[in-house]
Image: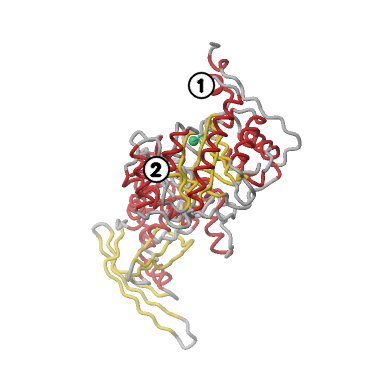
Amino acid sequence: MKPGYQKYIPFQPQKIENRTWPDRVITKAPVWCSVDLRDGNQALVDPMNLQEKLEYFHTLVDIGVKEIEIGFPSASETEYEICRELIEGGHIPDDVTIQVLVQAREHLIKKTFEAIRGAKNVILHFYNSTSTLQRKVVFHMDTDGITKIATDAADLIYEMSKPLIDQGMNLRFEYSPESFMGTEMDYAVEICQAVLEHLHATPERKVILNLPTTVENCMPNQFADMLEYFCRKIPGRDSAIISLHPHNDRGTGVATTELGLLAGADRVEATLFGNGERTGNVDMVTLAMNMWTQGIDPELDFHDINKIKEMFERCTKMPVGDRQPYAGKLVFTAFSGSHQDAINKGSQYMKDSGTEYWEIPYLPIDPADVGREYEPIIRINSQSGKGGAAYIMEHNFGFDLPKAMHPEFGSVVQHETDAVGTEITPERINQLFHQTYIDVDGPYKLLKHAFQETIDGEGHSHVAFQGTIQHTDTIFQVSGEGNGPIDAFFNAIKGEKMARFSFLDYASHAITDGSDSQGVAYILLQDQRDGKKYWGVGLSHNINLAPLRGILSAINRAKRARHHE
Ligand code: KIV
Ligand code: ZN
């Protein structure tokens, strides 16, 4: 054997003239078929028991999947019993078709027919391997021999189906040339054409031709070329439903499916969260939600993805990864500061503009569409920028910090994240905010105060302020008048040491927490001695007191800063 990568035979692309798939777009949902209960289940370390399979089946029905492969009833007694319970237990809604898989072998086909009796809608899915490699190393057969396996099975199935169809069963057929992706395309066309003929396919009684990438072995564009070639060449294209069954060995199952749909496929076999043999089958959730984000109705309902994920993890004992598209724990988080800032701007833009469309950078989908929360999207760690902490204060705690204050509070939070080296919680951010701006009651403390407000005949307000202030051990009285509480307070402290500040900015709003409403005031002062600026925040049920507390907070912060210099 050659060493390393040289031992691999590169994929030989199918030649095709004037391919048309690159110019197409997906405009509608395919027919979906879930293979969770077969391909998915057979790939589990601990396969699902009857109860788990039933629960899973009902979830698929609730999602809106209309074709569900329930298993391989000829493979074991357990599989057979599950099939019987689904049918006899009345679990299958009238608009849902169950699909059963069987190898193209006589005794297994007969057993499968036994398993489906009494069902209303059934797809009988049979397969045999057609690839060059399998013919060479497994079957030691030429193409005629392989075709005969398929057509003998088709004849038997066609004959055995007659009485069931006469009794009213809606019985349809599906054939898979297993390992289609490793089969010469002209031979794939030949064997599928033979199967269509032996099953007497017509445009009225179409047969599903399922073309699996049993092992994904080429790039999605190469697969699309193969599929377009196949669809062009197959005689009786209108008597067939072209189905995809992509696996994910190269990690491109979703792309292969999407390009396959462009290249002419009508139907997709997939599993929730991409469970299945080896790297899994293609992920139905990702495919469907990708369509959703392009403004196409996928005709599947994933509005409560957490519930589906919980069922999936419990029944399969397989975890859904934190980065799994649409469903992973972390997919609606933004760690980067510039992303957080852009998300803030996007949601503000949506509010201000009243746009009818989802226009938020870095969030390809509205988390609410899959039942996820928008609130905890932003998490703060040392990589976060200045806007993230302000975002948390607004969205989690109702403090709408003035824009000019964001960098200062961002640095406070950054200092903490650098020190602890991990992400910090919104609660810790709130604590830092209170410690930094609100719980700063020293060296100056307002012990008592009174306001007296008069409004003159022309509606002008006049406020008189009297207060008792403590500075370390000294207590002193101040009084002053002005056209509002802030003005009156500043006039009252004129001449005091604490008055060496000029007033630069002010903002306020109410914060409502249940029935309790408080006013919050943000004050920006400038120290006249060195020009440094300090924010202060005051919180009070009294609308006049909040700004005074804000001023004292800013002054105290300035004093503490000078003290530490
Ligand atoms: O991957 C595959 O080829 C299959 C077939 C049985 C359809 O699962
Ligand atoms: Zn498969």
Q: Which residue is located at x 53 percent, y 39 percent?
A: 245
Q: Amino acid at mark 1?
A: Val
In which quadrant will I find the C terminus?
top left
- Nearer to me, 179 or 252: 179
Q: Residue furthest right?
A: 18
Q: Compared to 163, does 481 lie above or below?
A: below
Seen in the image, is 19 located left or right of residue 328? Answer: right
Q: Which residue is located at x 33 percent, y 46 percent?
A: 52
x, y percent for residue 415:
39, 43
Q: Is residue 534 visible?
A: no
Q: Amino acid at mark 2?
A: His
Label 1: how many residues lie within 10 Å, few (<14), some (14-19) or many (20+)? few
Residue at which label 1 appears: 138
x, y percent for residue 193:
64, 37
Q: Which residue is located at x 56 percent, y 64 percent?
A: 352
- Nearer to me, 312 or 381: 312
The quarter of the displayed image where residue 63 is located:
bottom left
x, y percent for residue 4:
53, 15
Tell me the distance, in whole angstroms, between the alpha carbons under discs 1 and 2.
64 Å
- Nearer to me, 56 or 288: 56
| Comparing labels 1 and 2, the label whose residue is closer to the camera | 1
Q: Compared to 307, does 2 lie above or below?
A: above
Q: Secondary structure at mark 1?
A: helix
Residue at which label 2 appears: 415
